Image (spheres, grey):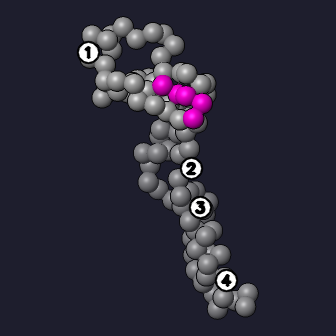
Amino acid sequence: MKQQFRPLAALGLAAAILMPAYAQRAVPVKDFDVFVDLPSGFAFIKTPEAWRFIRKLDAEQLTRLHPSTLTALLEPEDETTAEAAKTDSKPAGVDFSTLAYLP
């Protein structure tokens, strides 16, 4: 029975090694915070239940946003994370030949 799970375990290990770890952290958000998506101009408010659409802001309103208005919900990436996301190479020091299924 354990023999049957070896290929699956090897595949899972390979996926864990090869999958990029680009997790970005979310900005802490409180109830009644306002978020404006700058490209679309859509404004939202965070209620205790969910995010609610308020309205579409025009270009003039977008220039006068209150300083506490959120314009991003993810923290900015640092340079190391951004560079890692650009590279598409295998991790250093990993012998991929050992990940093959051996009966």
| Label 3 to label 2: alpha-carbon separation | 9 Å
Q: Which residues are magenta?
A: 45-49
Query: Could you tell which of marks 1 and 4 lies nearer the N-terminus?
Result: 4
Query: Could you tell which of marks 3 and 4 lies nearer the N-terminus?
Result: 4
Q: Give x and y (percent) for residue 71.
A: 44, 23
Q: Nearer the viewer, residue 33 or 28?
A: 33
Q: Secondary structure beneath disc 4? A: helix
- Closer to viewer: mark 3 or mark 1: 1
Q: Is residue 95 visible?
A: no
Please name the amino acid that badge 3 sits on: Ile
Please name the amino acid that badge 2 sits on: Ala
Query: Could you tell which of marks 1 and 2 lies nearer the N-terminus?
Result: 2
Given contact means CB atoms under 8 Å apart, are the residues at marks 3 and 1 in contact?
A: no
Mark carried by residue 59: 1
| Label 3 to label 4: alpha-carbon separation | 18 Å
Residue placed under numbered mark 2 in the picture: 21
Residue placed under numbered mark 4 in the picture: 5
| Label 1 to label 4: alpha-carbon separation | 58 Å
Residue 6 on the magenta segment: no
Q: Nearer the viewer, residue 18 or 46?
A: 46
- Closer to viewer: mark 1 or mark 4: 1
Q: Residue furthest left?
A: 59
Q: Nearer the viewer, residue 57 or 52?
A: 52
